[in-house]
Image (tube, rainbow, N blue to C red):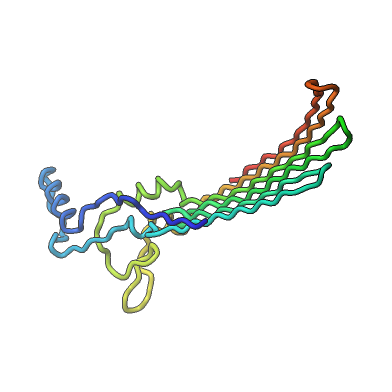
Amino acid sequence: RLTVSNPRHMIPILDGPLYMRYNNLGRLTMGESIADLRPDTTHTRDYASEIMRSNAFAQEYNLSINGGTKSMNYLLSAGYMNQPGLLRNSDYERLSLRGKFGVQMSRNLDMQIGFSHSSTKKHQAGGGDSGAMMRTLMLRPLESVGIFKDGLYIDEETGEILDANSEISNSLYTTDEKKGMMTDFNLALNWTITKGLVFRSTAGYRINQNQN
């Protein structure tokens, strides 16, 4: 199964000229001199779009088989999911396995064996996805000198890196990774003593690991 996600609503931001008008108005209200940058000479940069994906394509696959004989049956299934986040540098991946076996050991005794395994891996922007977006929305929406690419300001003529936008760089290059794994084993013995009366004995074991 393939699905696509895209931002349903982007928070509108002030453009550069309007930002500078409000900035200068605030300075005058506080009795300060206005900024040297004139509103009519500024350009707008939407920094939020720098860390967002316009589309995120997720994929999920599942497979199962079953069968058996008169005295034995089985069911096996596997699943895989990969889901990129709408923020660049974020994604979620999951692999799952499951099995169940039944054995009729005698007329009155049967055994059931089962297992399941799930492993997950999650990446998110440094400091958390929501924090990265909030910090980015708080940046001034002004065009800075040079070409801006992947969080870096680059001189258009020489290709030299002039400066780095720390918030954008953190979102694009700093990753928090979380891994998880859980495995379950279970065993059940059913002894039919008489019709309507069954003695059942069960045992199970679980392994759970998380890594940040």
Residue 48, placed above or below residue 200: below
Q: Viewer-proximal residue, 71 or 8?
A: 71
Q: Viewer-proximal residue, 122 or 132?
A: 122
On screen, residue 132 versus residue 27, left or right, reads right
Residue 72, placed above or below residue 147: above
On screen, residue 18 versus residue 158, left or right, reads left
x and y percent of residue 1 in the render?
A: 52, 56
- At 88% from the left and 33% from the top, the residue drawn is 107
Q: Quadrant of residue 54?
A: bottom left
Which residue is the extreme one toward the bottom? 157
Residue 211, placed above or below residue 155: above
Q: Quadrant of residue 200?
A: top right
* Circle count: 0
Residue 2, placed above or below residue 198: below
Which residue is the extreme one toward the right? 106
x and y percent of residue 63 in the render?
A: 64, 53
Q: Viewer-proximal residue, 198 or 167?
A: 198
x and y percent of residue 182 in the render?
A: 66, 42
x and y percent of residue 31 in the render?
A: 11, 45
Q: Quadrant of residue 191?
A: top right
